[in-house]
Amino acid sequence: MYLNCHSFHSLRYGTIPVGELVQQAVCCGVKVMALTDINTVTGIYEFLKECTAAGIKPLAGIEFRCGNEFRYIGLAKNTSGIAQMNRFLTRHNFDGSPLPLTAPDLSDVLFIYTMENAPASLKENEFIGIRPEELSKLVLNKQSRISKMVILQPVTIRTRTEYNLHRILCAVERNIILSKLTPQDHCRENEAMIPLKSLLEKYSDYPQIISNTQTVTSQCHFEFDFKTPKNKKYYTHSRQTDIELLSILAQQGLEWRYGKDHIEAKTRMIKELKIIDQLEFSGYFLITWDIIRYSTSRGFMHIGRGSGANSIIAYCLGITDICPLELDLYFERFLNLNRKSPPDFDIDWSWKERDVILEYIFSRYGADHVAFCGTNVEFKYRSIFREVGKVFGLPKEELDTLAKNPMELHPTNKVVRQVQQYGMLLEKYPNQRSMHSCGILISEEPITHYTPLEMPPKGFPIALFDMHTAEDIGLEKFDILSQRGIGHIDQSVKIIEKNRGITVNIRDTSLSKNEASCNEFLSRGKTIGCFYIESPAMRGLLRRLHCSDYKTLVAASSIIRPGVAQSGMMKEYIYRHNHPDKFEYFHPVFKEQLGETYGIMVYQEDVIKIALHYGGLPAADGDILRRAMSGKGRSKAALQRVKDHFFECCARQGHPVPLSEEIYRQIESFAGYSFCKAHSASYAVESYQSLYLKVHYPIEFMTAVINNQGGFYRTEVYVHEARMSGASIHNPCVNKSTYETTLYGRDIYLGFMQLQGFEYKTALLIQEERTVNGDYKSLENFINRIPIGIENIQILIFIGAFRFTGKSKNELLITARLLLVNFKPGDRNLKLIQEPAREFKLPALERSLFEDAFDEIEFIGFPVSCSPFDLLQTRFRGDVMAKDLLLHHKKQVRMLAYLISRKHVPTKMGAMYFGTWIDAEGELFDTAHFTGSLKEYPFQGGGCYLLLGSVEVDYHFPTITVIKMAKMPFIADPRYAHENDWKYKMQQKLKEDVSMTHRAPYPQEHEINIPRHKMNS
């Protein structure tokens, strides 16, 4: 009898999670109910499952609103009715037209109006909903329309608290304070579910209304087949022709990859083709192949990864560059007969080229059948307190305090307590719908069979449910990603060809993988700028492992992940790698299955292998574990059943309980945070490709990294790395620079994009005009040719972009101001050509050598013409240099260093940081700052610090545990010699890279204590 229920998927309106809404209906004795969220069907599939489990008949519908104005409720008679409403809503979402006042003609939908907005005449499928409090109106009015009336008891809230929460959400949606809300802006206080018996008693004097309502509910039957895949079935036109084409392509690829007589590869190919056909995944493989084929035809570089990289078919089709035979990739991780969904193919392109790929997919497979998966952006800690605080009228300063600090540090007044109370109720509630970063849905039937679509500014339609709902209903996404790492590689190759005339076939992975010079750089952690292996943590891991080959890098790419680190297995792996003769496998299965990784679970496959071969779990349970390991398993109940079954199987096989408990502890720690081996291998291949370019073409590579806007670090670090590689770094020049950074031989000219506050359009115009009409001859010539304001011309002068004129900055500034003070755009190409600039002579002005450096800090963010160390008041450069730290194990040292980055790490004693620094010789080193020292000697922003600490060498990798540190002052800014307030301001603009970690502290080593000896029964 409840025909208008809202869940919290009615964004910034509803307050009840779907599952809790159904449970409340059970408590109220409800036998039939409709979920009608506002302009969406996001929750109907979960609603259908929950109602079915609870014995309630589910009805699916939509409450149509235009902005905040109610139009009508639509109830689907069947799945066709859902599709009709979805198409109707999609059409209006796309063209932006308002929803009509009267309902559209949809044959499989029943519509309900309210008493206030019902049209004069009603169609056969249209009704009027009457609320209990409106029944009194029937006594006074003619009852001729009672034959079209149904019970309308909307459900939006459960309690008075939720009513207040609902009003807060409505105020958030309208961006107003609570006191500005009108009654029309929010629901009524009585929009809550009451026992069915009580509801029917309210209508007892109007049995026809009850009967009408029963008639409506009896006409609606929402059922859905969750088991049948909804993805596009075939690439050709049938299952048979798909597998025939796939077999032909696989055979061709087999000869390309392995030659004609590779028995092992052919056997694996035949085995995979058989299972792919049995699972009807041929179309999925062929669609992926088609996308790759198009990409290759455009000359684009891609990286294929994910569990699909376990497949020899994917390797032969060119989807991936990972040979599964070389790495002994676990086939069952990729495909097995228990698997219901296709394997993951995560395909990366350069961030500059991904949109071209997306446009191809949408045009190739039809706009009606392709959409981005949606996401539900939840209310999170910082956004909650900002949004709710604004509703209560708090000023910005107080909002900042609430958002940036933990609750125990919040003020304790009444308003803040209310903000906290309602804010915490909103945690994990959906706040906005957005677009999945990479997930594309390609369906057999039009996407609108399952969801309305929205069209965001980016121009690609979005489904109104997330990846979990998509998977539940049988729609598997294609992950079409972008990353800057491919941009680095791709542009490097182009710059090398332009600068040196050398063509590097970087796509031939045999060129870079396991190359001797690359391995030497790997073992020393010389990997700044290289994909996935440049972070301080990864560089430290490479040095601790003395990583010098492909397979070790594959393992390192996985053990750096949080799951392996959290379980203590990363530390144990490092120990066993360095001391392979100082441990025992604690059970024979670990030696048999995990001998390559010293008996340590490193990859998702390892977890499944141990569960199957040690625990004796069936393959179906292994698939549940697989989904949990990859973060896709949402059912805690299913995972708990697997856990119970694991211990039962272990006990049956006579395994000692302590060993089984330790093994499952390690398994649990992996959940959602580990890589499959193929994924790690894909990362390692790309890391080698970028490292090869760094080793052999370092200046070209660093130029590409700068142009692709870096990676883990800020631009300054990559500029420094280029200089350390032998490049000469130059500030932007109007005759040499483009928008991006440019390389001439060994001379790097920073691009105009590096200038803070400089207009993008002007930067492009400078380059275009110079290409057409040649170099700029003077400042006057430049102003005559480029429409530019005084602010932008001053930026160019201050940064030295006119240094080719031989004039000082002061002269250029005065000239520019004289030319532009009364200059009108119409004068360009007329006045300046006819009248030479007036000549004048300035008095000689003394100029400090460091004025340029401070200009550079102001407009680029870091000094270019000198080192930060040159700007220090002190001449002390440290007692020890980074290159000698290995010789000072357990010794105390003083070092002077420039801060590059720091990473926050939570510990049980409080926050600590790991720092990365550059010494006066330009070499990198790392520090550890524990809670105690940070309290007395905190970080004070970017710049140079004097450090006192003790050196600890951990498996070839030195770290300084800092005892004391102090930020060292720069010289006074010579540009403000007579302005005390500004003398030291510019030093504050120096940046640091800070990364925060939001997780519970990892257990300490003694709390984990992974056994290094055999454990017997």
Image (tube, rainbow, N blue to C red):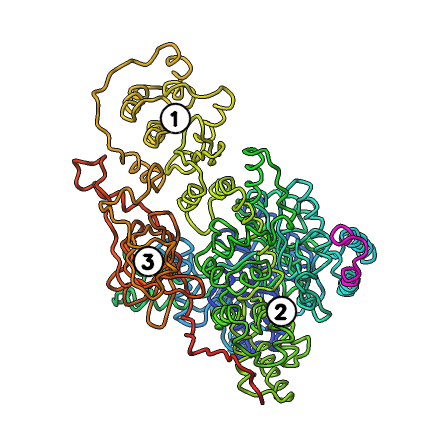
Q: Nearer the viewer, mark 2 or mark 3?
A: 2
Looking at marks 1 and 3 on the same chain, the residue that comes earlier in the sequence is marked by 3
Q: Which disc number belongs to residue 788?
A: 1
Q: Quadrant of the C terminus?
A: bottom right
Residue 327 appears in the picture as rendered: yes
Q: Which residues are magenta?
A: 254-268
Q: CA distance from mark 2 to mark 1?
A: 60 Å
Distance from disc 1 to disc 3, alpha carbons, whole Å, reads 48 Å
Dot in front, 1 or 3? 1
Q: Residue 500 in the image: state x and y as whole percent.
A: 56, 34
Q: Is residue 507 magenta?
A: no
Q: Which residue is mark 2?
A: 605
At label 3, which amino acid type do we have?
Ser
Residue name at image x 42 percent, y 57 percent: 185
Circle 3 residue: 179
**Badge 2 local density, few (<14 within 10 Å), some, or many (20+)?**
many
Q: Nearer the viewer, residue 584 or 590?
A: 584
Secondary-structure class at tag 2: helix
